[in-house]
Image (tube, rainbow, N blue to C red):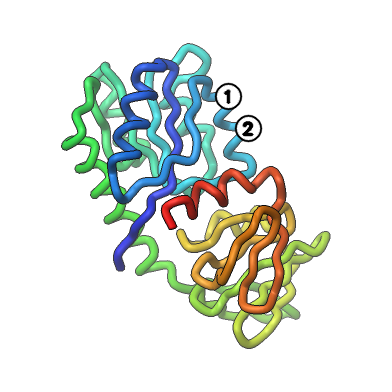
Amino acid sequence: MVIKDIRCIIIDDEPLSVKLLESYTTNCPDTILLQTFTNPIDAFHYLETTIPDLILLDVQMPELSGIQFIKILQKKCLVVLTTAYPEYAVNAFDLNVVDYLMKPINFERFTQAISKVKDQLAAQKNIEDYFFVKSEYKMIRVDFKDLLYLEGLRDYVALHTKNSKILTLQSLKSFEQILSHDFVRVHKSYIVNTNEITSINSNSLLLGKTTIPIGSVYAKNIKGRFKKY
């Protein structure tokens, strides 16, 4: 499975480091930069609505260290740590980060880390190609490739597949933790399969003949995801 367009954010309290990583993500054909942060607390607020594929995370920050950030983080995304301090390496790999980049970071070393991220995303996608959901006292298998979109309905979520509509007593947030790289939240009530999108405008998108609204909070993420096309 080939993974392209790794959606990433940068968290680093040093503006020069942010600028360097921003240039690397721009020049790397496999990465899309969604947002940058010099304050990790601001990044946490962003992650409440958007789950990137990758976080490029500085270790040494005054408000919250990168190690502390990872321990608090409960999102389905990969992490590459960046730091000028080699003594953090052991703790970093104990937290299952993908890679550990020593500053000053050169572009070749950066692309090596991105290659590792691609491998992990591909492995996840190959393994996690379906899931089971409880509906009407039974467990129903749902293949990612057949799932068009998820719709939040108060206490329920409706899973719209190519052949059926499945209701389950769960939240959209719980599904964000298990859905594959192809799915993105576009509204407080909708998560869509990006492989099924036929067109996008400023405030809605089409999945075949179905119109899905794009919430203002999620619009920037959607724009970033598809800006290369």
| Residue type marked 2 | His
- The residue depicted at 22 percent of the width and 26 percent of the height is 105
| Residue type marked 1 | Ile
The image shows residue 53, relative to residue 82, as above or below, that is below
- The residue depicted at 38 percent of the width and 53 percent of the height is 5
Check the picture and name the quadrant holding the C terminus: bottom left
- The residue depicted at 39 percent of the width and 24 percent of the height is 18
Disc 1 element: helix
> Where's residue 159, x and y in %?
67, 73
How busy is the neighbourhood of tag 1: few (under 14 within 10 Å), some, or many (20 plus)?
some
The numbered mark at residue 45 is 2
> Where's residue 43, x and y in %?
55, 30
> Where's residue 95, x and y in %?
37, 37
Reading the image, the residue beneath label 1 is 41
Q: CA distance from mark 1 to mark 2?
A: 7 Å
Q: Viewer-proximal residue, 192 or 203?
A: 203
The image shows residue 2, relative to residue 41, as above or below, that is below
The image shows residue 141, relative to residue 110, as above or below, that is below
How busy is the neighbourhood of tag 2: few (under 14 within 10 Å), some, or many (20 plus)?
few
Check the picture and name the quadrant holding the N terminus: bottom left
Q: Residue furthest right?
A: 154
In the rendered structure, are the residues bearing label 1 and label 2 in contact, judged by CB atoms less than 8 Å apart? yes
Q: Residue furthest top?
A: 62
Q: Residue furthest left?
A: 108
Disc 2 element: helix
The numbered mark at residue 197 is none
> Where's residue 116, x and y in %?
25, 48
Find residue 44 and report its image quarter: top right
